[in-house]
Image (tube, rainbow, N blue to C red):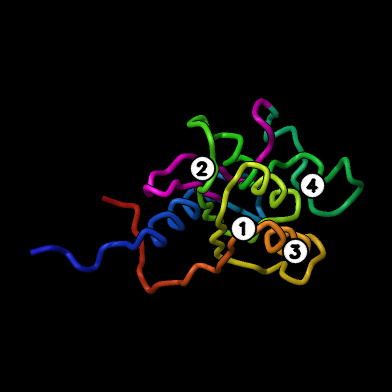
Amino acid sequence: MKQTNYLSWDEYFMGVAILSSQRSKDSTTQVGSCIVNNENKILSVGYNGMPRGCDDNEMPWEREGAPLDTKYIYVCHAELNAILNNDSGSLKGTRIYTTLFPCNECAKAIIQSGISEVIYFCDKYANTDSVIASKKMFDMVGVKYRQYNISNKTIQLSL
């Protein structure tokens, strides 16, 4: 008999994005992303962190202070990391699962890379200029976006 309580594709890919977010060294905001093609194959994942080769222990992780003493100037966001980590060719027509609605900078990269749909877990910055701009650009170019429908399933990592 076939199991009936298996993960949906959305649950599976958002689970990968959530698991990816756990790689982030950011103590206040951990974000993960997973890019998937129309055959439901994972093309890339990413999380928010410092650029490759920049020592996480030497870089600032603060939220407050002079710009050069905060994380904001340095950190590469999860969506951009997922786009840059892709080595399988074009991202045209793919979808990205991300734990936080993309900022305007990531929205531009999503649009330019050809991703056609954004599935997001949380939109806690919905009223910020950055996210309002993201949605305006997505609407203008036809990138679909929708909030992930949270299921009651628990995913356990132990065997």
Res 127 → quadrant = bottom right
Circle 4 residue = 72
Residue placed furthest toward the right? 66
Horizontal and vertical percent for residue 135?
71, 64
The residue positioned 51% from the left and 31% from the top of the image is 89
Q: Nearer the viewer, mark 3 or mark 2?
A: 3
Left or right: residue 75 versus residue 14 is right
Residue placed furthest toward the left? 1
Residue 34 magenta = yes
The residue positioned 67% from the left and 69% from the top of the image is 124
As rendered, which of 123 and 111 lies closer to the eye?
A: 111
Q: CA distance from mark 3 to mark 1?
A: 10 Å
| Kind of residue sitting beneath label 4 | Tyr
Q: Which mark sits nearer the N-terminus, 4 or 1?
A: 4
Circle 2 residue = 45
Q: CA distance from mark 1 to mark 2?
A: 19 Å
In the rendered structure, are the residues bearing label 1 and label 2 in contact, judged by CB atoms less than 8 Å apart? no
Disc number for residue 143: 1
Q: Nearer the viewer, mark 4 or mark 1?
A: 1
Q: Nearer the viewer, mark 2 or mark 4?
A: 2
| Kind of residue sitting beneath label 3 | Lys
Magenta residues, as a range?
A: 33-53
Q: CA distance from mark 3 to mark 2?
A: 25 Å
Res 92 → quadrant = top right
Q: Is residue 129 above or below residue 66?
A: below
